[in-house]
Image: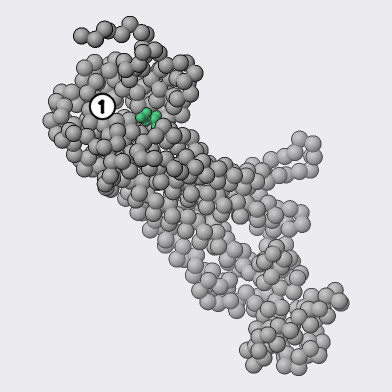
């Protein structure tokens, strides 16, 4: 018999060691302070794993019942805040296992049969992320609904469309809002697409090579609602590409939100005054009593930085890691959690922001009257009379040059004056200079005419309705 250890060892794996782990190393390597957030997923994963072990007669039915009851008790303790987390037990997995053994003894020691923390943690994160994906999709859908509602109230609200932030052509505010609807639609598609890869079960990969027990991961997959199981144990325990995909989706989503944030900030300035936000969604200044600041859109815009950072953190974490699991992967959680939290709070507050927007249509209309916004319409009308576009462009550029020198808007020039530049200009062409006719004329799919925007809104409403029905069906499993 080898001599029995007398060291005061506290770690599950410490019997192999000749001296206790240094406190600093214990603190440095422990993840329980942040991975305890996975506790619920860890428990449901363990219940499914032990059910399969019993089905496969690897453990007895009595062991399974004891494990299940013990884990459910632990779940309640955690919920009530009665659970004592300790860094001696390193992470969420070992904390729960330790408590299980305290509660039920021998049967608890069998839970870890045929698995490793490597496939366990990968399973936990996937379960966590699957739920986060579902919630994120719901939130995007709600935000899209808010955009569509505001757009439908503004099908006929005319505003300047900008390029280079200079007045370009008249558009409707409804059309402008629906552009963001489209961006979010693509974001939601990206999110739902990554769900397939998130929803794949790694359990069974064990430490890296699989396990010699007669396990049936398919059964665990069914019990936990996974669509499929990972095909390669080395890959399953080591890759975090599914989390990187969520972070990449988040970075793109926040980039899109940051664009509308920027516009909201601009639209609220005294120079624009296109919209106002209710006081409850703004903040004041500690020194300037007159200020009402758009802190919320500014903050969401600012949060783009952290979600970009999280994406880069995970990409860098995964880069050059040799197969299979390495402790580097413990660093996957905080960036992922942070991206999920940031995305969810940003989406929730953004929905309120959009619902709170009050539109100042008079100011929008006033703004579109400056900047010769219908110059392209004048050129297009000449083209329709047989002038080549390049020539028409030249004629109108001369008209604009003249109007500028007179400090007058193109649309306000009398017909007589216009004809001096091109005798083909007649009354019907002059009419094309009106803002309303400009907007109405962009009447094709994707155009800004109220009719087209109305159609886009109708299809959007259907899409959103279908999506929420699909989400509800999914959550029934
Ligand atoms: N806390 C670890 C993590 O988050 C769990 C896996 C530990 N595996 C190991 N071989 N040390 O990655």
**Horizontal arrangement in the rendering, residue 310 relative to residue 411 (left or right):** left
Determine whether the residue tagged by mark 1 lies in a helix, strand or loop: loop
> Where is the N terminus found, in terms of image quarters?
top left
Residue 18, image quadrant: top left
Foreground residue, 39 or 333?
333
Rendered position, 367 above or below 280: below
Residue 88, image quadrant: top left
**Horizontal arrangement in the rendering, residue 124 relative to residue 385 (left or right):** left
Rendered position, 126 above or below 393: above
Residue 77, given in percent of the width and then of the height, sits at: 36, 21
> Where is the C terminus found, in terms of image quarters?
top left
Residue 475, given in percent of the width and then of the height, sits at: 33, 45
Residue drawn where x is 42% and y is 62% of the image = 462
Rendered position, 463 above or below 85: below
Residue 257, given in percent of the width and then of the height, sits at: 57, 52
Residue drawn where x is 19% and y is 39% of the image = 216
Residue 361, given in percent of the width and then of the height, sits at: 68, 62
Foreground residue, 232 or 380?
232
Rendered position, 361 above or below 332: below
Foreground residue, 321 or 367?
321
Indicate which quadrant contains ligand 1: top left
Residue drawn where x is 79% and y is 88% of the image = 421
Figure coloring: one colour
Residue 299 visible in the current orientation: yes
Residue 472 visible in the current orientation: no
Residue drawn where x is 49% and y is 38% of the image = 335
Residue beneath label 1, please? 112
Q: Residues within 10 Å of mark 1 (few under 14, many from 20)?
A: some
């Amino acid at each position: 018999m080898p001599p029995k250890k007398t060291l005061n060892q506290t770690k599950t794996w410490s019997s192999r060691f000749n001296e206790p782990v240094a406190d600093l190393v214990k603190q440095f390597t422990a993840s329980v302070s942040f991975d305890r957030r996975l506790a619920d997923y860890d428990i449901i994963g363990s219940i499914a794993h032990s059910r399969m072990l019993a089905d496969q007669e690897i453990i007895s039915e009595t062991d399974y019942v004891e494990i299940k009851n013990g884990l459910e008790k632990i779940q309640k303790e955690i919920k009530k805040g009665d659970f004592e987390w300790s860094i001696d037990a390193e992470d969420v997995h070992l904390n729960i296992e330790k408590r299980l053994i305290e509660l039920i003894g021998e049967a608890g020691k069998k839970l870890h049969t045929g698995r490793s923390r490597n496939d366990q943690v990968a399973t936990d994160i996937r379960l966590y992320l699957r739920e986060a994906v579902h919630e994120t999709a719901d939130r995007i859908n709600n935000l899209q609904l808010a955009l569509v509602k505001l757009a439908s109230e503004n099908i006929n609200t005319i505003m300047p469309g900008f390029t280079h932030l200079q007045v370009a052509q008249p558009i409707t505010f409804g059309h402008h809002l629906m552009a963001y609807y489209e961006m979010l639609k693509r974001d939601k598609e990206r999110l739902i697409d990554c769900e397939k890869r998130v929803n794949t079960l790694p359990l069974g990969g064990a430490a890296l090579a699989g396990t010699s027990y007669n396990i049936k991961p398919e059964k665990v997959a069914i019990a936990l609602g996974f669509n499929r199981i990972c095909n390669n144990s080395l890959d399953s325990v080591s890759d975090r590409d599914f989390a990187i995909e969520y972070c990449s989706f988040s970075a793109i989503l926040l980039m899109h939100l940051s664009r509308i944030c920027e516009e909201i900030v601009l639209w609220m300035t005294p120079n624009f005054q296109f919209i106002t936000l209710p006081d409850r969604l703004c903040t004041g200044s500690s020194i300037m009593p007159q200020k009402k600041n758009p802190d919320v859109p500014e903050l969401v815009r600012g949060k783009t930085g952290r979600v970009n950072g999280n994406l880069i953190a995970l990409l860098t974490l995964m880069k050059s890691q040799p197969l299979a699991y390495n402790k580097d992967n413990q660093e996957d959680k905080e960036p992922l959690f942070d991206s999920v939290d940031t995305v969810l709070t940003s989406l929730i507050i953004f929905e309120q922001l959009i619902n709170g927007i009050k539109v100042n249509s008079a100011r929008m209309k006033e703004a579109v009257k400056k900047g010769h916004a219908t110059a392209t319409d004048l050129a297009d009308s000449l083209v329709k009379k047989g002038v080549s576009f390049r020539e028409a462009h030249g004629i109108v550029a001369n008209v604009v040059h003249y109007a500028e020198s007179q400090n007058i808007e193109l649309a306000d020039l009398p017909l007589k004056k216009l004809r001096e530049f091109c005798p083909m200009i007649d009354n019907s062409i002059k009419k094309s200079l009106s803002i309303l006719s400009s907007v109405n004329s962009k009447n094709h799919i994707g155009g800004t005419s109220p009719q087209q925007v109305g159609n886009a809104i109708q299809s959007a409403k259907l899409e959103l309705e279908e999506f929420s029905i699909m989400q509800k069906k999914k959550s029934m499993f």
